[in-house]
Image (cartoon, helix red, strand yellow):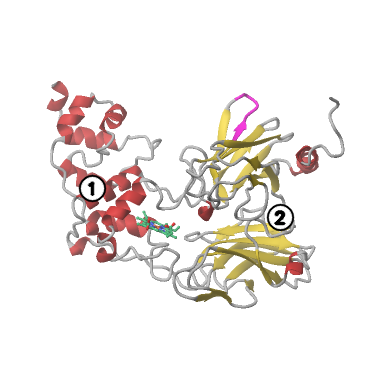
Amino acid sequence: MPALNVAPALLLAALSFQLPDTEGVRHTAAEFRQSRAGVLAFVPADAPAASARRLGLPFPVLQILAARPVPAPTFTRDVAPILYQHCATCHHIGEVAPFPLIAYQDAAKRAKLIATVTASRYMPPWQPEPGCGHFQGERRLPDADISTLRRWAEAGAPQGDPAQLPPAPHFPEGWQLGTPDMTVRMPKPFAIAADGPDQYMCFVIPLHLTADKYVRAMEFRPETRSVVHHALFLLDSGHIGRQFGESYPCFGTPGFLPSGALGGWTPGMQPARMPDGLQLVLRKGSDLVMQIHYHATGKPETDQSALGLYFTDKPPTKWVADIPLGSHQIDIPPGERAYKVRDHFTTPVDVEAVGIIPHAHYICKEIEGWAILPDGRKQWLIRIRDWNFNWQEQYRYTTPVKLPADTRLEMEFTYDNSDANPRNPNHPARRVVWGPDTTDEMAGLHVQVVPEDMDDWHELGQALWGKFMRSVGGGFYRKPE
Ligand code: HEC
């Protein structure tokens, strides 16, 4: 076979650096060094045909090359760098994950489980499908790392040369952005029992602001990180939340229509900085309502988390509008495996999407949001194949997504209300309708957009008002039959 006359290691090594990243395969210099010994260590063993196609080589050539022995990955050289970069933020003592993944022993005794949960992409938790929107803080493991973890487990989790172990990751204590201009702390410690179902609590915190403030950055610090699964920060200028008490259970919604929102937090997230011009406004007199999702750890805990706010004198020059796609008309018969909720909105003006927030409860399976651009092209905004309520997040695009006037935004959520759905909270399955409780469902896809020209703000607002009228069932105006 003539192709084999070319020094294959060099040829493949050269080609490997030109591999497109479209399938999530990227190869590091370390892997290259490793692959010089094994020639094909970087080719995912379970996809040789696909790799051959990518490399432009005939498949049999690869098969012959792949037969050469490949040295097994070791913990110190290959596995620790992956765990330190992608897992240790949550998997260290005191954090939200149930065990650390830093020392060799911690990882080695779970090598098979690590291989399984990374292959299925259950870990690291990250829901959006690749290629359907690029988001800040993506926690998706490259295919090459998944393959390394699998081969390490198959080889019996060898430790390797201790001298090759990289320094353990360092997790900064204290405020990462420095002392906040204002610290909004839960008024009292909240007790979380040793066992029991997850709890969703709202804490109403009066801010006592005598003037409007502009927020340029914020940092959430959970006090007891092992119990705090996620947090949401809402504003309440009408003081409606106070009617429910200083703190109250709130599973789906806070029980009032927020006058604004400051975003959310999930473990491992970096402090949020607002892009210039998009500072958030805290209206004087507003309350901040902190919704926290608590998860029991097996021993009783208390928590008194705090949000640090960093102000600027510069008022925003732009505002974010929320395009709420979704529906309240949810009525899912028991046993229904693919119940669909759809909605759409056509923007009358040029906007840029800066973020997107999907929301549904337990039996939602698939979340899809996309845009049909004026030229007919379909552009994904987000796609989640296996929705997990426990890992709901607010996603920010790495680069704002341009949506010219006349773009139609569409959403489709799919629900599985059968007994076969392991996440169904009702056994036996029962009829599920729209509502805020764990056993109810919701469908919301909030697309956060900024008009390219702020003079278009009112036109966008009017179109959204029209959409709102449609969603309340056209109560004020009905289309003639
Ligand atoms: C954003 C936080 C976070 C990151 C990052 C993360 N984990 Fe986890 N992990 C968790 C939490 C929380 C749990 C326990 C709850 C659960 O299973 O969802 C968990 C559970 C696990 C489990 C136990 C699963 C089971 O079925 O018992 C394994 C194994 C695991 N993680 C491995 C990893 C590996 C390997 C990585 C990196 C490639 C990783 N995790 C990254 C938060 C995280």
Q: Magenta part of the protein: which range?
A: 370-376
Front one among 94 and 215: 94
Q: Quadrant of ligand 1?
A: bottom left
User: What residue appears at the point 78 percent right and 68 percent down from the top-left corner?
Assistant: 285
Does any atom of ligand 1 lie closer than 8 Å to the CB of label 1?
A: no
**Rendering coords of residue 159 (x, y %):** 19, 60
Mark 2, mark 1: which one is toward the viewer? 1
Q: Quadrant of the N terminus?
A: top left
Marks 2/1: CA–CA distance: 51 Å
Which amino acid lies under the numbered mark 1 shown in the image of this protein?
Arg
Where is residue 387 drawn, in percent x and y? 51, 46
Image quadrant of residue 8? top left
Residue lying at 47% horizontally and 43% vertically, measured from the top left? 420
Would you say residue 226 sits in the magenta stretch? no
x then y, percent, for residue 348: 74, 34
**Residue at position x 68%, y 65% in the image:** 289
374 falls in the magenta region = yes
Image quadrant containing the C terminus: top right
471 up-or-down from 84: above or below: above
Q: Which mark is residue 193?
A: none
Residue named by callout 1: 151
Q: Residues within 10 Å of mark 1 (few under 14, many from 20)?
A: many
As drawn, is 116 to the left or to the right of 403?
Answer: left
Residue denoted by label 2: 316
